[in-house]
Image (cartoon, coloured by chain):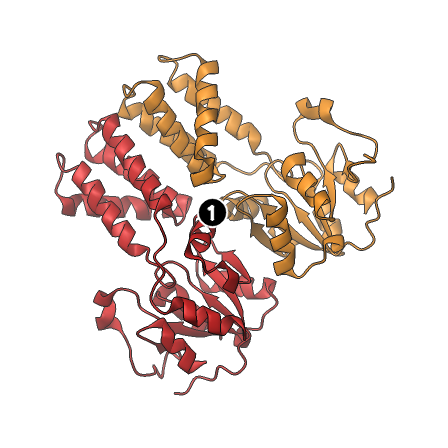
Chain colours: A orange, B red
Amino acid sequence: MEVDYSKIKVVGFDADDTLWVNETYFRESEHEFARLLSAYETENKIDQELFKKEIDNLDIYGYGIKGFMLSMIETAIELSNGRVDSNTLTKILDIGKDMIRKPVEVLDGVESVLKELSGKYRLILLTKGDLLDQERKLEKSGLSEYFHHIEVLSDKKEDNYKNLLEHLEIQCEEFLMIGNSLKSDVLPIINIGAKAIHVPFHTTWAHEMVHDDDDNGGYKTIDNISEVLKLL
Amino acid sequence: MEVDYSKIKVVGFDADDTLWVNETYFRESEHEFARLLSAYETENKIDQELFKKEIDNLDIYGYGIKGFMLSMIETAIELSNGRVDSNTLTKILDIGKDMIRKPVEVLDGVESVLKELSGKYRLILLTKGDLLDQERKLEKSGLSEYFHHIEVLSDKKEDNYKNLLEHLEIQCEEFLMIGNSLKSDVLPIINIGAKAIHVPFHTTWAHEMVHDDDDNGGYKTIDNISEVLKLL
């Protein structure tokens, strides 16, 4: 199936793991967290408990590093049956602060794509992270000049996208989303009648990649963001 | 000085302490926090240290309850010289979780103002809090139907407002901001050539109120948000 991009006026980019590295830092932090608590449990068990806590808290904390920090603190207290010392808790807070302060590693090909597209389309950064974190990363990345503005969504479900397009006064068929997450950046977008391009991040996710056009899905999957330029 | 509101097309409302009670809950939480740490310090000293910590962390955490929670944890560890027990830390986390789950107390007169204005202007909710918190409060408040959408700013300084109006494609003279904070909702707005109405929240702030038109400032201060209807 050929996808027709001729009506596109606005292109939304996911930020984390689409424009720059992010998930890798969470994996490193989880590893560091497990190391700090290694007296109490195996790394595997600690990973599982932290993940469970994050999911339990997602409803109240939402996405982002601060919620991750609070979930680490809570997991550390529970896993250790309250025996964790305050020195360790301080180190856990430092893990989070270090994440917030990390330099931004822009992914290959991103800048040339933004440069090329920014002349032809209105580009927006579309994230469900924390606004302050994302503004900081955008500034550090040196990519700000290419974006019209940042939109933060509390979640990336169909209704969130619908409300966004309504408030931006954009028709669904005029909108293209580019991102690494099928669940957040691609499927809800297709379902509301807009366009999406999937750029998986982790090389280990390669098994899941669909290289040919997906006849049912109506979106393209590409290896590297540079290929966007051949499609548009 | 008469302020001319005839060009206004879009009205921005601050959320916390303009539409609903907020600051009061922070004061209650600080009091509860001091009570939990009363073995280590006086309430006055604890308040001061927490405030200092919040200001130190503002740069990395931004505004909102999660950052407040992380600052409480850090303050508790430092104030107690690491002696604070994990049971107390869990109670501190609970203070924050309770704040997030609090019912929303809409301020007097708010709903009728929104009802009246929503037919004539595009209303937006304009906050520097956490998007998820604010969406949740807006839903609980029952006021969602009156707003076109929510805008979250990482801060409320002149540049943040300028970028916002640019992205909404609104001229400065078409924009009116209504809020309780002179520093965040009024002065930066006046400085960029838009209009502002100041509605102070705390009765204890009455001393600072300017009831007559402020000839230099170019904004109005009103006692109750209902008075907006007489001005517009």
Q: Compared to A91, does A35 lie above or below?
A: above
Specify few, some or many for label 1: CA neighbours under 10 Å numbering under 14, 14-19, or 20 or more: many
Residue occupied by mark 1:
B132
Quadrant for residue B156, please give it: bottom left
Q: Is mark 1 on a helix, strand or loop?
A: helix
On the image, the x and y values in percent for residue B92 come to 27, 36
Depth check: A69 or B145 in front? B145
On screen, residue B162 above or below B69 = below
Q: Which of these two is toward me, B131 or A98?
A: B131
Badge 1: chain ID: B
Q: What residue type is labelled 1?
A: Leu
Q: Residue at x 66, y 61 (%)?
A: A169
Q: Quadrant of residue B104?
A: bottom left
Residue A107 visible:
no
Q: Is residue B82 visible?
A: yes
Quarter of the figure that contains the N terminus of chain B? bottom left
Residue B87: where, in percent of width, then height?
Answer: 24, 27
Camera-nearest residue between B84 and A194: A194
For the point 68% across and 53% down, the residue is: A123
Tell me if B9 is positioned left or right of A212 in this view.
left
Q: Position of residue A176 (x, y in %)?
A: 73, 48
Spot occupied by residue A225 in the image (x, y as percentages of width and height): 73, 38
- Name the residue located 69 percent from the left edge and 36 percent from the top edge: A108
User: Is residue A18 placed above or below B225 in the rendered structure?
Assistant: above
Q: Which residue is drawn at 34% across and 81% down?
A: B214
Residue at far right of view = A2
